[in-house]
Image: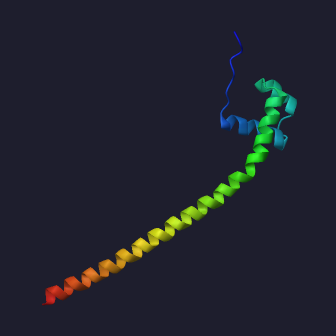
């Protein structure tokens, strides 16, 4: 029977890569401690470097989406406020007649 592949959470991979990049732990120490192959660790570091810029790009898109949502909600609030004021005026006009 073959070896069963281990799977690692994104949080674990992130922590291991950060340990390497920040120099908190030596690469050899990480490989031994977690029983990882050098090629696996190298692949994780490469993926981190390639995907990192996209993380910040999606953040700016998220903010613009939030801004659009806020603008839409402000338009709705404005419309409802005008309708409420008109209803109050009509109600007071009808009561006086």
Relative side of 3 to 71, left or right: right
Specify whether residue 18 is in view.
Answer: no
Viewer-proximal residue among 52 and 23? 52
What x and y, as percent, mark residue 2?
Answer: 71, 13
| Residue 50 on image: x %, y % | 77, 46
User: In the orientation shown, which residue stands out farthest toward the front?
Assistant: 1
Q: Position of residue 64 (x, y in %)?
A: 59, 64
- Judged left or right of residue 91, residue 82 is right
* Image: 20 above or below 73: above
Task: Identify which residue, 22 or 41, lies in the foreground.
Answer: 41
Q: Nearer the viewer, residue 8 or 68?
A: 68
Total number of numbered discs in the rendering? 0
Visible in this render: residue 31? yes
Q: Residue at x 83, y 30 (%)?
A: 39
Give how far across and how far down residue 73 sits, in percent: 45, 68
- The quadrant in which the N terminus is found is top right
Quarter of the figure with residue 95: bottom left
- The part of the image, by quadrant, that contains residue 45 is top right
Q: Residue furthest top?
A: 1
Quadrant containing the C terminus in the rendered view: bottom left
Which residue appears at 69% of the width and 52% of the height? 55
Q: Residue placed at 74% from the left, 49% from the top?
A: 52
Looking at the image, the residue that sits furthest to the left is 97
Q: How is the image coloured?
A: rainbow
Q: Residue at x 82, y 38 (%)?
A: 20
């Amino acid at each position: 029977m073959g070896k069963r592949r281990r799977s690692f959470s994104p949080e674990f991979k992130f922590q291991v890569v950060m340990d390497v990049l920040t120099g908190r732990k030596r690469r050899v120490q990480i490989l031994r401690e977690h029983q990882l192959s050098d090629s696996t660790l190298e692949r994780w570091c490469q993926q981190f470097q390639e995907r990192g810029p996209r993380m910040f790009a999606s953040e700016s898109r998220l903010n613009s989406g939030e801004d659009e949502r806020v603008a839409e909600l402000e338009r709705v609030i404005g419309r409802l406020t005008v309708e409420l004021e008109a209803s109050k005026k009509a109600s007071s006009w009808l009561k006086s007649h």
